[in-house]
Amino acid sequence: MRPLNAIHFDFRAKLVVAVMVMSLVALLASDMAIYLLMAVLAIYLAVQGLARHALAYLSVALVLIGMRVLSGGNGITFLLPEMFLFMLLRTVLMLMAAEPLLGMPPGEVVAVCKKLHAPDLLSLPLTFMLRFIPAVRGEFRDAADSLRTRGLLSVRHPGRAFEYAVTPVIFRSSRVAEELAASAESRGISSPGAHSCRREIRFGWKDALLVLLSAATFATCICIDKVVLG
């Protein structure tokens, strides 16, 4: 449940942020630019009432940064080479940018796609993906709670714990996918007529400001990257 004072951005503005972050992840090479982008994304999540998610992502990023510093840029043995840590850190950035999209109501996503006249070949898979990922994440959480209650979740046997957690989620996920598809179909997701949404779908000044700040962050990170690398 997000706080009532959290800022709500339009789906299109969030999508622009995600695309810019994905582009920066592919372009940036300097750590300074990466850290700046991470700080901006943490603020971006916090203003939307996702401060806990921001702290969780920052905690994971700090662990990865600490590993890189301790290893002197050589990685932690052959199990965690420098390139792998490099990729994981950038994966955290992509997850931070995608987090606000994953929590959006599917009805709002459908309404925006209809307003943009997006083809069903694109809008329907996107809608199911945004609804399916949180559902599977909840299944993993329930499986972990069940294993913890029964004393089967132990770091001494990571392989067995992984098997016990993943196996029920795989079987449950197939059923969740069928239920989501049936629910969406019964609500008329494939109907060719006009779709209604209780939320107001409007690209306001907050969304325009978010896009401008994203563009400014994009340009700043590119400039810092070029200056640092010479």
Image: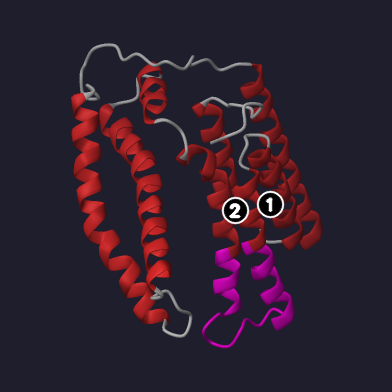
Q: Position of residue 110 (x, y in %)?
A: 35, 25
Amino acid type, residue under disc 1 in the picture: Met
Please give the name of the residue rendered at 36% of the width and 39% of the height, measured from the top-left corner: 131
Highlighted range, magenta: 60-88
In the image, farthest residue toward the bottom: 77
Query: Does residue 230 show up?
Result: no
33 left or right of 108?
Answer: right
Q: Which quadrant of the structure image shows residue 219? A: top right
Q: Position of residue 26 (x, y in %)?
A: 57, 55
Query: Does residue 122 show up?
Result: yes
Query: In the picture shown, does residue 191 fall above or below 134?
Result: above
The residue carrying mark 1 is 38
Amino acid type, residue under disc 2 in the picture: Leu
> For the residue labelled by badge 1, is the local secondary structure a helix, a strand or a loop?
helix
Q: Position of residue 51 (x, y in %)?
A: 65, 44
The residue carrying mark 2 is 93
Residue count near mark 2 (Cα–Cα under 10 Å), binned few <14, some 14–19, many ≥20: many
Query: In the picture shown, does residue 173 fall above or below 203?
Result: below
